[in-house]
Amino acid sequence: LFRSYQEVVRSVFMSTSSNASGSSRKQTMKDFQEEVSNLYTNIRLFEKGAKLFSDETQTALAKHMLKTTCTDITNLIFNFLAGDFMMAVEDYTSITSDARKKLLGKVQEETRAPLSKLHMSLNGKSLEDFLTCLDSAADACGIMMKKGDKKKERQVVFQHRQALIEQLKITEDPALVLHLTSVLLFQLSTHCMLHAPGRCVPQIITFLNTKVPEDQHILLVKFQHLVVTQLIGQTKKMGEGDEDTAENQALEEAETVRKELQELSASIKDLVLRSRKSSLTEE
């Protein structure tokens, strides 16, 4: 349901962390190391945000990051090494688990073990384990990962927020509006970035209960309820063939929910856009 959010986040990564990659993806070592370092900084910053939640939510966030951003940096490294075997692809984000296994059979013995551990860590549920494996694999492959300094980190956080805000401005889909608004309110209130799947949006909204004014939180919860109602209605519509009377009633209810969402959407976006204006004034 939140695939569009994933597309938004990936476009943010490509615009804010992948300064060097040209259309041919023929990167120099310096360009490659810069891209790896930027993705590494993103993961570290997302990890910082995840640690503000309960253990159960942290695990869900970690699994999500392992499937997305952590897989991206792993594929970036594997694709760079694949160039030595004429196996590199133009878009490293398309590399599959099987493709990584195939490459592992070709690399030198001393790099195979740490790369295998990195590959396997993507199936775990610990970001710390992944980052340990990533450090070992980078060392074995001679990849220098710059640990982001405070100035660099502040720049990444700012760029990430701005990119999500620009997406929020043009988004019409209520579920995506809720997702982006929740993540942005989290960042505005904690100064931490967050990379979350749609199923964690309720936990983010609960977290925000003590971070935003009560009237804003009530509005957010109301919008969340309407989004869930709409999504449930869409699922029923696809799965059932009701009698005419029940179907007409369902259509009327769906239209009422759609209108309410449309009316509230601008107010929900303003929770972020107004906060941004006031924070800029304070700065």
Image (tube, helix red, strand yellow):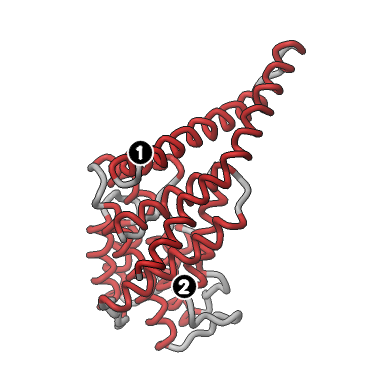
Looking at this view, is 16 or 100 the one in front? 16
Q: Return the residue found at the far right.
A: 244
Looking at this view, is 40 or 277 the one in front? 277
Q: Check the image and report above or below for 184 versus 241.
A: below
Q: Check the image and report above or below for 33 versus 101.
A: below
**Secondary structure at numbered mark 2:** helix
- Label 1 and label 2: CA atoms lie apart by 34 Å
Which residue: 35% across, 59% down? 193
- Identify residue for label 1: 214
Could you say where residue 255 lies in the image, as x and y percent from the top left? 69, 28
Residue 104 sits in quarter: bottom left
Residue 16, numbered label: 2
Res 104 seen here: no
Q: Amino acid at mark 2?
A: Thr
Which residue: 31% across, 64% down? 45
Mark 1, other Cα within 10 Å: few <14 / some 14–19 / many ≥20: few
Which residue: 25% across, 50% down? 52
Give the position of the N terminus as an image quadrant: top right
Could you say where residue 191 lies in the image, as x and y percent from the top left? 31, 61
Left or right position of 197 against 25: left
Q: Amino acid at mark 1?
A: Glu
